[in-house]
Image (spheres, rainbow, N blue to C red):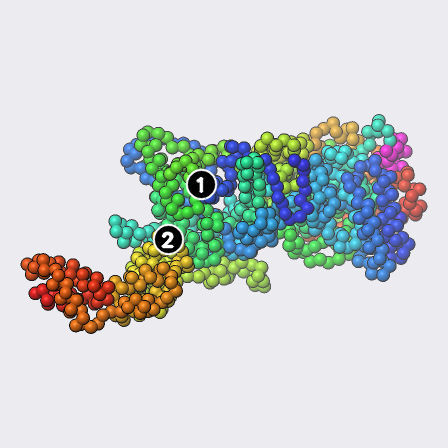
Amino acid sequence: MLGLTIREVSLALREGRISPKELCQKCLKLIKKTKFLNSYITVTEDLALEQAEEAEIRFQRGKPLGPLDGIPVAVKDNFSTANIETTCASVMLKGYIPPFNATVVQKLLDQGAVLMGKTNLDEFAMGSGSTDSIFGPVRNPWSYSTHCRDRSGQTPGGGTSDSDWAVTGGSSGGSAAAVASLTCFASLGSDTGGSTRNPAANCGIVGLKPTYGLLSRHGLIPLVNSLDVPGIMTRSVHDAATVLAGVLQGHDPKDSTTVDYPITPINLPDDIDVSSICIGIPREYHAPGLSSETLSHWSRTAELFEKAGARVVEVSLPHTQHSIVCYHVLCMAEVASNMARFDGLEYGYRSAVDSSTEAMYAATRHEGFNDVVRRRVLSGNYFLLKHNCKLFVVKQIRIGHLGYNFVLMFVCCVCFRLLTPTTLTEAIRYTDFTKEDNRTRSAQEDIFTQPVNMAGLPAVTVPVALASTRLPISLQLIGQAFQEQKLLTVANWLEQQVKFPLIELPDMHENTEKSSSSLAV
Amino acid sequence: MAASSVGSCVVCSCINRVSPSQRHLLRTFTYNSFFIRNVRTSYLCFQNQVQAQIKSDPRQLVAVVGLEVHAQIHSKSKLFSGSHVKFSAPPNSLVSFFDASLPGTLPVLNRRCVEAAVMTGLALNCTINKKSLFDRKHYFYADLPAGYQITQQRVPIAVNGSLAYSLVVGQKRKEVVTKSVRIKQIQLEQDSGKSLHDDSRSQTLIDLNRAGVGLMELVMEPDMCCGEEAATAVRELQLILQALGTSQANMSDNDVLSDLSLSSAHDPSKQGSLKREIASFITLDLLIFSTDYEIERQMAVLESGGVVVNETRAFDFKSGPGITLIVLNFIFFFSLRFMPEPNLPPLIVYDRQTVPPNADPQQVINVDWIREQLPQLPQMKRRHLVEHYGLLPEHSITLVNEDGLMDYFVSVVQETTTEPKKVVGWIIKDLLALLKQHSLNVSQSPISPSSLAELLNLLEAGKISSSVAKLVFQELWRGTGRSASQIVQEQDLSMVHDRGAIQQICQAVIDSHQEEVRAIQGGNKRVLNRLVGLVQKEVKGRADPVQVRAILEEKTS
């Protein structure tokens, strides 16, 4: 049952094959079993059961709210949740309980979704491995799948010597692992430079980064305001569309950067004809470090499109290499600015040092933030000094827009969608990942994903195959702004073609119906 | 102190004493009951030339004064949040999640504040930028919860305006000159919270009620040359803002704060390189005093061959009259960091040509619509007084510049047959003088416009003499609740019209002052005035002085 998609489980709920409460309890049980993955920071067990009970009443009355009613979901711990601790995986916000819900969270709850908990991430979403959290790193569930275990002999939650598991990618690693390990049916991540797509790709699930301005950022604790978007993680493209329709708000009066987008249900046709579409393959994405396996799956997928009649053309995005530089300058400048509010006065952590206000600030910020955050704040403030600001930030914004225009121009004029890898390789082992620092890893890991944020476009990652390591390889489709429906339609077609397998966690079989694996998409 | 989380909209945070060096950076603090606010540095900072040496003749020194005025926008809610704006509400009772900088909250621009800034810009002849941008200005301070202030550094809402103000000059202060100061820009800006320093417990208490309140920052070019000019310009601005209703512009409520920049140099064109600032003042008198003090101080430094350093000073009331203190140095300026505000799209305003055809008037800001709503401005009021009532320009200035005095004047004029020119004499020379003497506002005047009008009507009708009128005026001021005619009746002050009686009194005065009579007869006609005075004393001023004079002349000739 837990391996079903939202569409399937929603039908099961309607037909009474399972009740919302039973579903919730199953998920809670699995969350406990998969605790070693470290996907969740907070499990809101009582609240989830309460919400499931409410959903149950609605189902009993025959009046469910919609396709998300009674569906267990998880939310990254950088979305504000009323009366639920929201930590950003940082000492700074440990114990911080927001008094309000982020708009997207509120929308999910309004649709009857059952919140299972808050998921782990890199501190303040700064990272690409979900390894820099005060709650410890997140483990990739695929490291413990039967596919993978057969190969490497891993055991779930193994002993202390167990460090040879793969990372989830980041920064929304907890959200990705939660969905991939079947503890919930959908999760919210945030995507600033790839933070939703990167872990989704590594964990073999669908990760959608919507167009900037489509979803409200109100309540999302910002990393880079001008790039952040709430991301959606599910086990199928169809589910991503369902959740997207569920959290769509149109213009949110609480977020001035949202656009007035008509709220229409996103319908993905089952019979898709791709013969009329054009797929662009950006030349610059043949980047150093791209694994041969990823490259071959990329090429094979392009061929799939071609065979189905789509026009596949090579395109050039000459600004791609500058994009990551712009991204880092912008990112650090905004980080320095956004982190300025964490001074220990109004909320969050406050140091015991109290000799003066400045000393208290300094100590609070030193003790509250990890090295990564502090390093970005320091360099960001350097960029923001008035004489540097013009030199770096304003220039980067201009270049960023140039890049934006380029990507946009290509996507709009030459072809409708771009097909690229999501990551250079499949997920890396933790021991290898931590050989490089956070900054280097972010630059490597976000290479294919962050230009999309710079351009504000929608993109979706779809798992296409398992690598020889038995870890997922995913590809990214980039669409035109506010054309999520078209993008997801193509992604849906791709998903149908590749028939990516459902994860098989050894211990899970005892707890779930046998049908789960056979019902995989 | 333990970490705390905000569970409601009330934030009451207690932090340890701000260190001495930081104390000088306070944005606002109470100091001998005056509010002093530190400088706005947006256009003064980052001068490459930190100091300049003056080598030529100091006798040709000219001072230039620039001003940055912060006016609190009169609006129900704050600039970017729905919290109410109210003076003297209980601490931290008007704080939204955004005002307390809870992570994840976003600014939402208040339309009313934009309209106020546009209207002010139009009244000050500014060009309204159809597209303006918001920026973040960063610095750490305890009452600045987000660690930055949202302002308009790069592209403000209004630019290139001017403010005309009339100055009364000359030895007799009868000459009126009209001057003009250029308005560089008007920008929308958030206010910060308030820090209250509790010395005895060595704590700083923070009140965020004011945090996020909308301000208009008006930057005036250094076109003024002394404290009086600066104060007159600020007063004119205050009157304009009040007329527009865009700011209550109450100096005592901290609605208007001016920061002064000042420099002295030989060549006015080189002024830009020499900047001094004095932090803001709550009264115009203090503004005049400290400006002139600082000009003198700078000139003395230059004359003695010294060097004027670019710095910021505050006016210190404790240390005695006219001491300016250094409060900010350049290090602080360099620690300010700016960045475009990513959470607010560009602010677009429209005019009749560009307004989208189906736009909801509640959703868009149309400059032309706002222009049509502009009320009568102070300068127009003065012109009206001069043209319609035939008043002298200097009187029109006094009437308009004193709160409520023009209305008072108009009310009196409506109820009396007395010429407006005479009415203004009574209002300015008698009433206003007394009000000032007792530190009262026009609204607190014990004499209402109608009772003054009644008095003037008695005088005009010849029922009382002018000296009696002054007496009755004094009586009215005491506020016994009796009207002018009641006073005249009760104290028997009506004019004596009986010629025989006056002749008798005149005769008695002549009889008892033979020496004076001889002097008059000897040709010294001026002595006659003394006799007139003595007669008036006898009749308690109730006789017609012309008649008395005629009788006396007749009798002494």
Q: Tell me: residue B70, above or below residue A128.
A: below
**Left or right: where does residue B476 sit relative to residue A426?**
left
Callout 2 secondary element: loop
Residue B546, image x and y in percent? 18, 66
The mark found on residue A472 in the picture is: none
User: Does any portion of residue B396 appear in the rendered image?
Assistant: no
Callout 1 secondary element: strand
Main SS of residues in magenta? helix
B405 vs B153, nearest the viewer: B405
- Confirm whether the magenta stretch covers residue A154: yes
> Residue type at mark 1?
Ala
Q: Which residue is mark 1?
A: B279
Residue B72, image x and y in percent? 50, 51
Q: Which residue is mark 2?
A: B438
- Confirm whether the magenta stretch covers residue A221: no
Q: Residue at x 80, y 43 (%)?
A: A43
Magenta-tinted stretch: A141-157
Q: Residues within 10 Å of mark 1 (few under 14, many from 20)?
A: many
Q: Residue at x 67, y 38 (%)?
A: B3
